[in-house]
Amino acid sequence: MHQHDGQYFELSFKQFLFYFILSLTLDALGNGLSVSTNLGSAPWTAGAANLAHLTGLPIALYLGLTTVLVATANIFFARKLDWRRFFGNILFGILFSLMAGFFTSWFMTLGINHFPLWSKVVIDIIGLSTIGVGISIYQRVNVILHPIDDLTNILRFSYFHGSAPKAQMSNFFVAIFISLICWLLSGTVVALNIGTAFAFLCQGSIIAWSDRFVFPALVHGNMDKSHKDIPQQN
């Protein structure tokens, strides 16, 4: 939804397509940058990596299971069954996984993982910040979302009165807990590093900042689908 001179307008199909492709690309690009530095992934990716390390099964399996389980959980948190939204979550998860895999492979071929430590830290932070910007855009479009980011949207407006940092940190608590359980069972932990801490502490604030300053005329739409509070900026 667009806001102009105090009036609200639904997005056209071309506008939706532009914002969707841009935000999906930013999200996948940021994840590719983050993963290629090997300095810590976002908490849910780290949780999947630790489950894979614990069991010896492919990480793709756990990323897929996460997509389905979180999409199912969203139905209960939203207190509304929306099959189009559920399958949209699954579709987004598939598209994101393919694009993130492409960008990760591309950045690995560029040798980012062999860069000096200080430059990898900068790249990791840029990547995680880019993820936050992408999430902000497609959460405001609010048509097709990654289920994890849809969960943040639901928590933000239905339980935390519009606070993106509180919603994102609450979302990440579960992912961090998964990694901790794996650590207790295996004695080792992977994919947790400075990038994970940055994502946990700062990504919600980056989303809130992007809501205000990146395409500020783009406001949260389709709130009746899964949220019950009037959006507020925090």
Image (cartoon, rainbow, N blue to C red):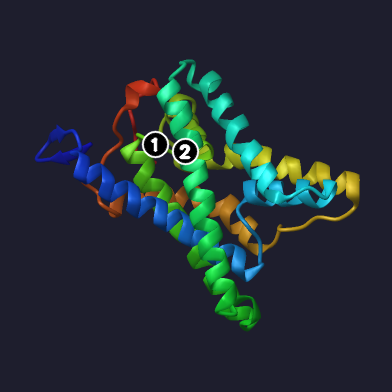
Q: If the image is split into quadrants, where does the N terminus sit?
A: top left
Label placed on residue 144: 1
Camera-nearest residue between 162 and 64 = 64
For image coordinates 51% across by 33% down, the residue present is 151
First-in-chain label (2 vs 1): 2
Q: Which numbered tag is attached to residue 179?
A: none
Where does the image place residue 62, in percent across and percent down from the top left?
69, 42
Please name the residue that numbered disc 2 is placed on.
91
Task: Give the quadrant of residue 230.
Answer: top left
In the shown orientation, is residue 54 left or right of residue 81?
A: right
Q: Position of residue 89 (x, y in %)?
A: 48, 34
Q: Is residue 59 visible?
A: yes
Q: Is residue 152 visible?
A: no
- Mark 2 Cα-neighbour bin, 10 Å: few <14, some 14–19, many ≥20: some
SS assignment at label 1: loop
The quarter holding residue 213 reads bottom left
SS for tag 2? helix
Find the distance from the CA under tag 2 to the CA under tag 1. 8 Å
The residue positioned 72% from the left and 52% from the top of the image is: 49
Q: Residues within 10 Å of mark 1 (few under 14, many from 20)?
A: many
* Residue visible at 65% across and 63% down in the picture: 194
Query: Which amino acid type is marked by label 1?
Result: Ile
Task: Answer left or right for 48 relative to 96.
Answer: right
Residue nearer the viewer, 73 or 5: 73
Which amino acid type is marked by label 2? Answer: Leu
| Count of numbered tags | 2
Q: Residue placed at 61% from the left, 82% from the top?
A: 115
Residue 210, position as x, y percentages in the image: 35, 52
Please report contact status of discs 2 and 1: CB closer than 8 Å, yes or no: yes
Q: Please say if 83 is above or below 71.
A: above
